[in-house]
Image (cartoon, grey):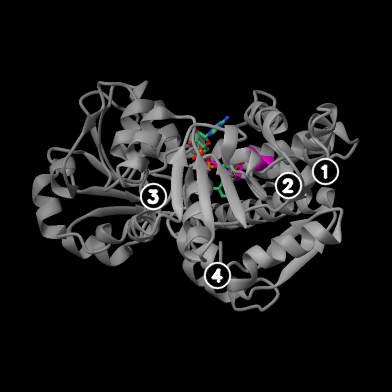
Amino acid sequence: MRITIIGAGYVGLVQAVGLADFGFKVICIEKDLEKLRQLKFGKIPFYEPGLEELFKKNLKSDRLNFTNKYSNNISQSDVIFICVGTPPKKKGESDLNFVNQVTKEISKKIEGYTVIVSKSTVPVGTSLLIENILKKKKSVKTFDVVSNPEFLREGSALDDFMRPDKIIIGCRTVKAEKILKKIYKTLKRPFVVTNNETAEIIKYANNSFLATKITFINEIADLCENIGAEIKTVAKAIGLDGRIGPKFLHPGPGYGGSCFPKDVKSLIYQGNKNSTDLQIIKAVDRANELRIKSLFHRIKKIVNNKFNNIQIAFLGITFKPNTDDVRESPGIKLAKDLFKTKAKIKIYDPKGMENAKKELSKSIEFCDNEYEVVKNSNLLVIVTEWKQFKNLDLLKIKRLMKKPVILDLRNIYSKEITKHGFQYHSIGNN
Ligand code: NAD
Protein backbone atom coordinates (compact mmCIF):
# COMPACT_ATOMS: atom_id res chain seq x y z
CA MET A 1 0.00 0.00 0.00
CA ARG A 2 1.45 3.37 -0.99
CA ILE A 3 0.58 6.13 1.42
CA THR A 4 0.85 9.89 1.04
CA ILE A 5 0.57 12.30 3.93
CA ILE A 6 -0.11 15.95 3.13
CA GLY A 7 1.20 18.41 5.73
CA ALA A 8 4.18 17.60 7.97
CA GLY A 9 2.97 19.39 11.11
CA TYR A 10 2.35 17.93 14.55
CA VAL A 11 -0.31 15.57 13.20
CA GLY A 12 1.02 14.79 9.71
CA LEU A 13 4.59 14.09 10.73
CA VAL A 14 3.57 11.79 13.59
CA GLN A 15 1.22 9.94 11.21
CA ALA A 16 3.95 9.69 8.57
CA VAL A 17 6.60 8.43 10.99
CA GLY A 18 4.16 6.05 12.69
CA LEU A 19 2.92 4.49 9.45
CA ALA A 20 6.47 4.22 8.07
CA ASP A 21 7.37 2.40 11.27
CA PHE A 22 4.54 -0.07 10.61
CA GLY A 23 6.37 -0.89 7.38
CA PHE A 24 4.41 1.20 4.88
CA LYS A 25 6.15 3.23 2.20
CA VAL A 26 5.20 6.80 3.06
CA ILE A 27 5.64 10.02 1.11
CA CYS A 28 5.00 13.22 2.98
CA ILE A 29 4.16 16.37 1.02
CA GLU A 30 5.00 19.61 2.81
CA LYS A 31 4.67 22.99 1.11
CA ASP A 32 6.75 24.98 3.62
CA LEU A 33 10.20 24.92 2.04
CA GLU A 34 12.09 25.65 5.25
CA LYS A 35 10.33 22.77 7.04
CA LEU A 36 10.99 20.57 4.03
CA ARG A 37 14.70 21.44 4.05
CA GLN A 38 14.98 20.48 7.71
CA LEU A 39 13.06 17.24 7.22
CA LYS A 40 15.25 16.22 4.32
CA PHE A 41 18.30 16.88 6.50
CA GLY A 42 16.96 14.55 9.15
CA LYS A 43 15.68 17.21 11.55
CA ILE A 44 12.13 17.60 12.74
CA PRO A 45 10.89 21.21 12.58
CA PHE A 46 9.25 21.21 16.04
CA TYR A 47 9.77 19.64 19.43
CA GLU A 48 7.96 16.41 20.18
CA PRO A 49 9.55 13.92 22.61
CA GLY A 50 10.74 10.68 21.03
CA LEU A 51 9.69 11.62 17.51
CA GLU A 52 13.11 12.51 16.12
CA GLU A 53 14.62 9.08 16.91
CA LEU A 54 11.84 7.16 15.16
CA PHE A 55 11.83 9.68 12.32
CA LYS A 56 15.58 9.19 11.71
CA LYS A 57 15.24 5.41 11.85
CA ASN A 58 12.53 5.40 9.18
CA LEU A 59 14.25 8.02 7.06
CA LYS A 60 17.31 5.79 6.96
CA SER A 61 15.24 2.75 5.99
CA ASP A 62 13.92 4.75 3.01
CA ARG A 63 10.33 4.01 3.99
CA LEU A 64 9.83 7.71 4.68
CA ASN A 65 10.37 10.46 2.12
CA PHE A 66 9.58 14.13 1.86
CA THR A 67 8.73 16.38 -1.06
CA ASN A 68 6.73 19.45 -2.04
CA LYS A 69 5.61 17.88 -5.34
CA TYR A 70 2.15 16.46 -5.79
CA SER A 71 2.49 14.95 -9.32
CA ASN A 72 3.50 11.27 -9.34
CA ASN A 73 3.25 10.95 -5.60
CA ILE A 74 -0.50 11.41 -5.76
CA SER A 75 -1.15 9.33 -8.86
CA GLN A 76 0.74 6.39 -7.35
CA SER A 77 -0.91 6.61 -3.95
CA ASP A 78 -3.50 4.17 -2.66
CA VAL A 79 -4.31 6.24 0.40
CA ILE A 80 -3.83 9.98 0.96
CA PHE A 81 -4.07 11.50 4.43
CA ILE A 82 -4.90 15.22 4.59
CA CYS A 83 -3.19 16.63 7.69
CA VAL A 84 -3.15 20.37 7.00
CA GLY A 85 -4.17 23.08 9.45
CA THR A 86 -7.78 24.24 9.85
CA PRO A 87 -7.33 27.53 11.73
CA PRO A 88 -10.25 29.56 13.02
CA LYS A 89 -11.73 32.49 11.15
CA LYS A 90 -12.85 35.57 13.07
CA LYS A 91 -16.35 34.30 13.88
CA GLY A 92 -15.19 30.84 14.91
CA GLU A 93 -15.81 29.20 11.54
CA SER A 94 -13.07 26.76 10.51
CA ASP A 95 -10.93 28.02 7.68
CA LEU A 96 -10.94 25.23 5.11
CA ASN A 97 -8.68 26.98 2.62
CA PHE A 98 -5.79 24.52 3.06
CA VAL A 99 -8.13 21.52 2.82
CA ASN A 100 -9.68 22.96 -0.36
CA GLN A 101 -6.30 23.68 -1.93
CA VAL A 102 -5.02 20.20 -1.16
CA THR A 103 -8.20 18.54 -2.48
CA LYS A 104 -7.93 20.49 -5.74
CA GLU A 105 -4.33 19.38 -6.14
CA ILE A 106 -5.34 15.78 -5.43
CA SER A 107 -8.22 15.97 -7.92
CA LYS A 108 -5.80 16.95 -10.71
CA LYS A 109 -3.51 14.02 -10.09
CA ILE A 110 -5.29 10.90 -8.84
CA GLU A 111 -5.48 7.91 -11.15
CA GLY A 112 -7.48 4.82 -10.25
CA TYR A 113 -9.22 4.07 -6.97
CA THR A 114 -7.79 6.16 -4.11
CA VAL A 115 -8.88 6.63 -0.52
CA ILE A 116 -8.67 10.25 0.64
CA VAL A 117 -8.63 10.49 4.42
CA SER A 118 -9.22 13.64 6.40
CA LYS A 119 -7.14 13.62 9.59
CA SER A 120 -7.46 17.37 9.95
CA THR A 121 -10.20 18.49 12.33
CA VAL A 122 -12.94 19.63 9.97
CA PRO A 123 -16.56 20.68 10.44
CA VAL A 124 -19.43 18.41 9.59
CA GLY A 125 -19.99 18.44 5.85
CA THR A 126 -16.31 18.61 4.89
CA SER A 127 -16.19 15.03 3.60
CA LEU A 128 -19.06 15.94 1.30
CA LEU A 129 -17.21 19.07 0.21
CA ILE A 130 -14.11 17.01 -0.62
CA GLU A 131 -16.25 14.47 -2.50
CA ASN A 132 -17.87 17.26 -4.53
CA ILE A 133 -14.52 18.78 -5.51
CA LEU A 134 -13.29 15.37 -6.63
CA LYS A 135 -16.49 14.59 -8.53
CA LYS A 136 -16.17 17.81 -10.52
CA LYS A 137 -13.02 16.52 -12.17
CA LYS A 138 -13.99 14.24 -15.04
CA SER A 139 -10.69 12.37 -14.89
CA VAL A 140 -11.40 11.27 -11.32
CA LYS A 141 -13.23 7.98 -11.64
CA THR A 142 -13.31 6.12 -8.36
CA PHE A 143 -12.48 7.18 -4.84
CA ASP A 144 -13.64 7.12 -1.23
CA VAL A 145 -13.42 9.92 1.29
CA VAL A 146 -12.89 8.89 4.90
CA SER A 147 -13.07 10.96 8.06
CA ASN A 148 -10.46 9.68 10.51
CA PRO A 149 -10.01 12.41 13.12
CA GLU A 150 -6.85 12.54 15.19
CA PHE A 151 -6.81 12.66 19.00
CA LEU A 152 -3.09 12.91 19.77
CA ARG A 153 -1.83 15.33 22.40
CA GLU A 154 1.26 17.37 21.72
CA GLY A 155 3.95 16.34 24.17
CA SER A 156 2.92 12.68 24.01
CA ALA A 157 1.96 12.53 20.36
CA LEU A 158 3.91 9.44 19.44
CA ASP A 159 2.60 7.50 22.40
CA ASP A 160 -0.94 8.60 21.59
CA PHE A 161 -0.48 7.56 17.98
CA MET A 162 0.80 4.14 19.03
CA ARG A 163 -1.83 3.64 21.77
CA PRO A 164 -4.95 5.57 20.82
CA ASP A 165 -8.07 5.05 22.95
CA LYS A 166 -10.05 4.60 19.76
CA ILE A 167 -9.74 4.81 16.00
CA ILE A 168 -12.66 6.55 14.32
CA ILE A 169 -13.42 5.52 10.75
CA GLY A 170 -16.14 7.57 9.12
CA CYS A 171 -16.80 6.20 5.66
CA ARG A 172 -19.44 5.25 3.10
CA THR A 173 -18.13 1.93 1.80
CA VAL A 174 -16.93 -1.37 3.25
CA LYS A 175 -13.98 -1.17 0.86
CA ALA A 176 -12.70 2.03 2.48
CA GLU A 177 -13.37 0.67 5.97
CA LYS A 178 -11.29 -2.45 5.23
CA ILE A 179 -8.39 -0.36 3.91
CA LEU A 180 -8.33 1.86 6.98
CA LYS A 181 -8.55 -1.15 9.29
CA LYS A 182 -5.63 -2.71 7.45
CA ILE A 183 -3.53 0.42 7.93
CA TYR A 184 -4.17 0.53 11.67
CA LYS A 185 -4.29 -3.21 12.41
CA THR A 186 -0.82 -3.15 14.06
CA LEU A 187 -2.28 -0.97 16.82
CA LYS A 188 -4.86 -3.51 18.00
CA ARG A 189 -7.12 -0.73 19.32
CA PRO A 190 -10.94 -0.41 19.20
CA PHE A 191 -12.43 0.87 15.97
CA VAL A 192 -15.57 3.00 15.84
CA VAL A 193 -16.94 2.68 12.34
CA THR A 194 -19.60 5.15 11.33
CA ASN A 195 -20.57 7.56 8.59
CA ASN A 196 -18.41 10.56 7.69
CA GLU A 197 -20.65 13.15 9.33
CA THR A 198 -20.75 11.32 12.66
CA ALA A 199 -16.97 10.90 12.62
CA GLU A 200 -16.57 14.62 11.99
CA ILE A 201 -18.76 15.65 14.92
CA ILE A 202 -17.13 13.09 17.28
CA LYS A 203 -13.89 15.06 17.19
CA TYR A 204 -15.59 18.35 18.14
CA ALA A 205 -17.72 16.73 20.84
CA ASN A 206 -14.63 15.04 22.28
CA ASN A 207 -12.50 18.20 22.47
CA SER A 208 -15.36 20.38 23.65
CA PHE A 209 -16.15 17.95 26.46
CA LEU A 210 -12.53 18.07 27.64
CA ALA A 211 -12.54 21.86 27.42
CA THR A 212 -15.72 21.84 29.50
CA LYS A 213 -14.09 19.66 32.18
CA ILE A 214 -11.12 22.03 32.42
CA THR A 215 -13.37 25.07 32.60
CA PHE A 216 -15.57 23.44 35.20
CA ILE A 217 -12.69 22.69 37.55
CA ASN A 218 -11.33 26.22 37.01
CA GLU A 219 -14.64 27.66 38.20
CA ILE A 220 -14.77 25.37 41.21
CA ALA A 221 -11.16 26.43 41.95
CA ASP A 222 -12.22 30.08 41.93
CA LEU A 223 -14.98 29.29 44.39
CA CYS A 224 -12.57 27.32 46.60
CA GLU A 225 -10.31 30.38 46.75
CA ASN A 226 -13.18 32.52 47.93
CA ILE A 227 -14.54 30.12 50.54
CA GLY A 228 -11.30 28.79 51.96
CA ALA A 229 -11.45 25.29 50.49
CA GLU A 230 -8.69 23.32 48.72
CA ILE A 231 -9.21 22.50 45.08
CA LYS A 232 -6.64 19.70 45.06
CA THR A 233 -8.70 17.65 47.49
CA VAL A 234 -11.97 18.55 45.76
CA ALA A 235 -10.55 17.44 42.38
CA LYS A 236 -9.15 14.25 43.88
CA ALA A 237 -12.42 13.39 45.56
CA ILE A 238 -14.68 14.02 42.59
CA GLY A 239 -12.15 12.31 40.31
CA LEU A 240 -12.48 9.15 42.37
CA ASP A 241 -16.09 8.95 41.24
CA GLY A 242 -15.90 6.49 38.39
CA ARG A 243 -18.49 8.47 36.46
CA ILE A 244 -16.22 11.53 36.49
CA GLY A 245 -12.63 10.20 36.40
CA PRO A 246 -9.47 12.02 37.53
CA LYS A 247 -8.22 13.38 34.19
CA PHE A 248 -8.58 17.00 33.11
CA LEU A 249 -9.40 18.10 36.63
CA HIS A 250 -6.31 20.25 37.10
CA PRO A 251 -7.14 23.91 37.56
CA GLY A 252 -4.95 26.42 35.77
CA PRO A 253 -4.85 29.45 33.53
CA GLY A 254 -7.46 28.04 31.14
CA TYR A 255 -7.16 25.77 28.15
CA GLY A 256 -5.04 26.77 25.18
CA GLY A 257 -3.19 25.18 22.30
CA SER A 258 -3.98 24.87 18.64
CA CYS A 259 -7.05 22.66 19.15
CA PHE A 260 -9.39 23.28 22.10
CA PRO A 261 -10.00 27.02 21.62
CA LYS A 262 -10.61 26.74 17.90
CA ASP A 263 -12.60 23.51 18.11
CA VAL A 264 -14.90 24.92 20.79
CA LYS A 265 -15.50 28.02 18.69
CA SER A 266 -16.06 25.96 15.57
CA LEU A 267 -18.62 23.76 17.36
CA ILE A 268 -20.52 26.88 18.48
CA TYR A 269 -20.44 28.13 14.89
CA GLN A 270 -21.70 24.78 13.58
CA GLY A 271 -24.46 24.82 16.20
CA ASN A 272 -25.57 28.31 15.21
CA LYS A 273 -25.52 27.37 11.55
CA ASN A 274 -27.72 24.38 12.28
CA SER A 275 -30.26 26.11 14.55
CA THR A 276 -28.79 24.57 17.70
CA ASP A 277 -27.99 26.87 20.60
CA LEU A 278 -25.06 25.14 22.31
CA GLN A 279 -25.35 26.98 25.60
CA ILE A 280 -22.86 24.95 27.63
CA ILE A 281 -20.16 25.25 24.99
CA LYS A 282 -20.79 28.96 24.61
CA ALA A 283 -20.38 29.40 28.37
CA VAL A 284 -17.17 27.37 28.31
CA ASP A 285 -15.72 29.53 25.55
CA ARG A 286 -16.65 32.73 27.36
CA ALA A 287 -15.38 31.55 30.75
CA ASN A 288 -12.06 30.53 29.24
CA GLU A 289 -11.61 33.91 27.56
CA LEU A 290 -12.48 35.75 30.78
CA ARG A 291 -9.97 33.70 32.71
CA ILE A 292 -6.98 35.58 31.31
CA LYS A 293 -8.61 38.85 32.31
CA SER A 294 -9.22 37.59 35.84
CA LEU A 295 -5.61 36.38 36.10
CA PHE A 296 -4.45 39.78 34.96
CA HIS A 297 -6.47 41.38 37.77
CA ARG A 298 -5.09 38.90 40.24
CA ILE A 299 -1.55 39.91 39.27
CA LYS A 300 -2.55 43.55 39.48
CA LYS A 301 -3.75 42.95 43.03
CA ILE A 302 -0.56 41.09 43.95
CA VAL A 303 1.56 44.05 42.81
CA ASN A 304 -0.73 46.47 44.66
CA ASN A 305 -2.13 48.00 41.47
CA LYS A 306 1.30 49.35 40.49
CA PHE A 307 3.16 48.02 37.49
CA ASN A 308 5.71 50.84 37.47
CA ASN A 309 9.23 49.46 38.08
CA ILE A 310 7.79 45.98 38.47
CA GLN A 311 9.55 43.05 36.89
CA ILE A 312 7.54 39.90 36.27
CA ALA A 313 9.25 36.59 35.48
CA PHE A 314 7.44 33.85 33.58
CA LEU A 315 8.46 30.25 34.02
CA GLY A 316 7.06 28.60 30.92
CA ILE A 317 5.27 30.04 27.93
CA THR A 318 4.04 27.00 25.99
CA PHE A 319 0.40 25.98 26.49
CA LYS A 320 1.53 22.72 28.10
CA PRO A 321 4.82 21.01 28.89
CA ASN A 322 6.82 18.86 26.44
CA THR A 323 5.98 20.93 23.40
CA ASP A 324 7.34 24.05 21.74
CA ASP A 325 3.84 25.03 20.60
CA VAL A 326 2.62 28.41 21.85
CA ARG A 327 -0.51 28.66 19.71
CA GLU A 328 -3.32 30.11 21.87
CA SER A 329 -1.15 29.67 24.95
CA PRO A 330 -2.60 31.38 28.04
CA GLY A 331 0.98 32.46 28.81
CA ILE A 332 1.22 34.38 25.54
CA LYS A 333 -2.11 36.10 26.18
CA LEU A 334 -1.13 37.02 29.72
CA ALA A 335 2.28 38.31 28.59
CA LYS A 336 0.59 40.46 25.93
CA ASP A 337 -1.81 41.96 28.50
CA LEU A 338 0.93 42.60 31.04
CA PHE A 339 3.15 44.10 28.37
CA LYS A 340 0.59 46.86 27.91
CA THR A 341 1.26 47.94 31.50
CA LYS A 342 4.57 49.42 32.63
CA ALA A 343 5.79 46.09 33.97
CA LYS A 344 8.94 44.55 32.55
CA ILE A 345 8.39 40.96 31.41
CA LYS A 346 11.05 38.25 31.33
CA ILE A 347 10.44 34.71 30.10
CA TYR A 348 12.16 31.38 30.30
CA ASP A 349 10.77 28.23 28.69
CA PRO A 350 12.78 25.06 27.92
CA LYS A 351 11.44 24.68 24.36
CA GLY A 352 8.94 27.38 23.48
CA MET A 353 11.02 30.55 23.34
CA GLU A 354 11.68 30.63 19.60
CA ASN A 355 7.97 30.38 18.83
CA ALA A 356 7.10 32.85 21.60
CA LYS A 357 9.54 35.43 20.20
CA LYS A 358 7.54 35.42 16.96
CA GLU A 359 4.36 36.25 18.89
CA LEU A 360 5.59 38.77 21.43
CA SER A 361 7.12 42.22 21.45
CA LYS A 362 10.88 42.52 21.05
CA SER A 363 10.99 44.40 24.37
CA ILE A 364 10.15 41.24 26.25
CA GLU A 365 13.33 39.64 27.51
CA PHE A 366 13.98 35.94 27.01
CA CYS A 367 16.37 34.31 29.47
CA ASP A 368 18.62 31.26 29.39
CA ASN A 369 17.40 29.48 32.50
CA GLU A 370 15.12 29.41 35.55
CA TYR A 371 17.49 31.44 37.67
CA GLU A 372 18.37 34.16 35.21
CA VAL A 373 14.70 34.89 34.62
CA VAL A 374 13.92 35.52 38.28
CA LYS A 375 16.87 37.87 38.87
CA ASN A 376 15.55 41.15 40.35
CA SER A 377 11.93 40.12 39.74
CA ASN A 378 9.09 41.25 41.96
CA LEU A 379 6.88 38.35 40.94
CA LEU A 380 7.44 34.88 39.52
CA VAL A 381 4.53 33.45 37.56
CA ILE A 382 4.65 29.70 36.93
CA VAL A 383 2.83 29.42 33.62
CA THR A 384 3.66 25.92 32.37
CA GLU A 385 4.20 22.82 34.49
CA TRP A 386 7.49 21.69 32.93
CA LYS A 387 8.99 18.88 35.05
CA GLN A 388 12.20 20.82 35.59
CA PHE A 389 10.26 23.58 37.37
CA LYS A 390 9.08 21.18 40.04
CA ASN A 391 12.42 20.99 41.84
CA LEU A 392 13.76 24.51 41.75
CA ASP A 393 16.47 25.61 44.16
CA LEU A 394 14.08 27.75 46.16
CA LEU A 395 16.72 29.36 48.33
CA LYS A 396 18.57 30.48 45.22
CA ILE A 397 15.33 31.77 43.68
CA LYS A 398 14.57 33.71 46.84
CA ARG A 399 18.05 35.19 46.89
CA LEU A 400 17.83 36.28 43.27
CA MET A 401 14.36 37.80 43.38
CA LYS A 402 13.77 41.37 44.42
CA LYS A 403 10.65 40.26 46.24
CA PRO A 404 9.99 36.54 46.83
CA VAL A 405 6.43 36.34 45.48
CA ILE A 406 5.17 33.40 43.43
CA LEU A 407 1.94 33.01 41.51
CA ASP A 408 1.72 29.32 40.70
CA LEU A 409 -0.82 28.90 37.89
CA ARG A 410 -0.30 25.13 37.81
CA ASN A 411 -0.22 24.34 41.53
CA ILE A 412 3.13 22.59 41.25
CA TYR A 413 4.14 23.88 44.68
CA SER A 414 2.09 24.22 47.84
CA LYS A 415 1.76 26.49 50.85
CA GLU A 416 4.82 24.71 52.29
CA ILE A 417 6.85 27.09 50.18
CA THR A 418 5.97 29.96 52.53
CA LYS A 419 8.33 28.31 55.05
CA HIS A 420 11.15 29.46 52.76
CA GLY A 421 9.93 33.02 53.07
CA PHE A 422 7.89 33.20 49.88
CA GLN A 423 4.56 34.87 49.47
CA TYR A 424 2.69 32.12 47.65
CA HIS A 425 -0.43 32.38 45.48
CA SER A 426 -1.92 29.41 43.67
CA ILE A 427 -5.13 28.39 41.96
CA GLY A 428 -8.06 27.28 44.04
CA ASN A 429 -6.48 27.52 47.46
CA ASN A 430 -7.01 30.17 50.06
P1 NAD B 1 0.38 22.31 11.66
O1 NAD B 1 0.11 23.72 11.32
O2 NAD B 1 1.43 21.98 12.66
O3 NAD B 1 0.73 21.50 10.35
C1 NAD B 1 0.09 21.63 9.13
C2 NAD B 1 1.13 21.50 8.02
O4 NAD B 1 0.47 21.46 6.76
C3 NAD B 1 2.08 22.70 7.97
O5 NAD B 1 3.42 22.23 8.05
C4 NAD B 1 1.79 23.35 6.63
O6 NAD B 1 2.92 23.95 6.04
C5 NAD B 1 1.29 22.16 5.83
N1 NAD B 1 0.46 22.51 4.66
C6 NAD B 1 -0.52 23.44 4.58
N2 NAD B 1 -1.02 23.48 3.32
C7 NAD B 1 -0.35 22.55 2.59
C8 NAD B 1 -0.40 22.11 1.24
N3 NAD B 1 -1.25 22.64 0.37
N4 NAD B 1 0.43 21.15 0.84
C9 NAD B 1 1.33 20.59 1.71
N5 NAD B 1 1.43 20.97 3.00
C10 NAD B 1 0.60 21.93 3.45
O7 NAD B 1 -1.02 21.70 12.11
P2 NAD B 1 -1.28 20.48 13.11
O8 NAD B 1 -1.17 20.96 14.51
O9 NAD B 1 -0.52 19.30 12.66
O10 NAD B 1 -2.84 20.24 12.85
C11 NAD B 1 -3.32 19.73 11.63
C12 NAD B 1 -4.80 19.37 11.79
O11 NAD B 1 -4.94 18.35 12.78
C13 NAD B 1 -5.68 20.52 12.27
O12 NAD B 1 -6.93 20.41 11.67
C14 NAD B 1 -5.77 20.30 13.77
O13 NAD B 1 -6.94 20.84 14.32
C15 NAD B 1 -5.78 18.79 13.83
N6 NAD B 1 -5.27 18.23 15.09
C16 NAD B 1 -4.18 18.77 15.68
C17 NAD B 1 -3.69 18.23 16.85
C18 NAD B 1 -2.50 18.82 17.57
O14 NAD B 1 -2.29 18.51 18.74
N7 NAD B 1 -1.72 19.66 16.92
C19 NAD B 1 -4.33 17.10 17.42
C20 NAD B 1 -5.43 16.55 16.76
C21 NAD B 1 -5.90 17.13 15.60
- Residue depicted at 78% across the width and 49% down the height: 201
Q: CA distance from mark 3 to mark 2?
A: 34 Å
Q: Looking at the picture, how far across and down is residue 397, in whole percent?
A: 14, 52
Q: Earlier in the sequence, mark 3 or mark 2?
A: 2
* Residue under label 1: 142
Residue 136 sits inside the magenta stretch: no
Q: Amino acid at mark 1?
A: Thr
Q: CA distance from mark 4 to mark 2?
A: 27 Å
Q: Looking at the picture, how far across and down is residue 78, in whole percent?
A: 67, 50
What is the secondary structure assignment of the residue under circle 3? loop
> Which quarter of the image is occupied by the N terminus?
bottom right
**Labelled disc at residue 114:** 2
Q: Main secondary structure of the magenta part?
A: helix
Asked whether, in this view, residue 415 is left or right of residue 186, the answer is left
Seen from the viewer's position, the closer of residues 24 and 285 is: 24
Task: Determine if residue 119 is in view.
Answer: no
Which residues make up the magenta segment?
258-264
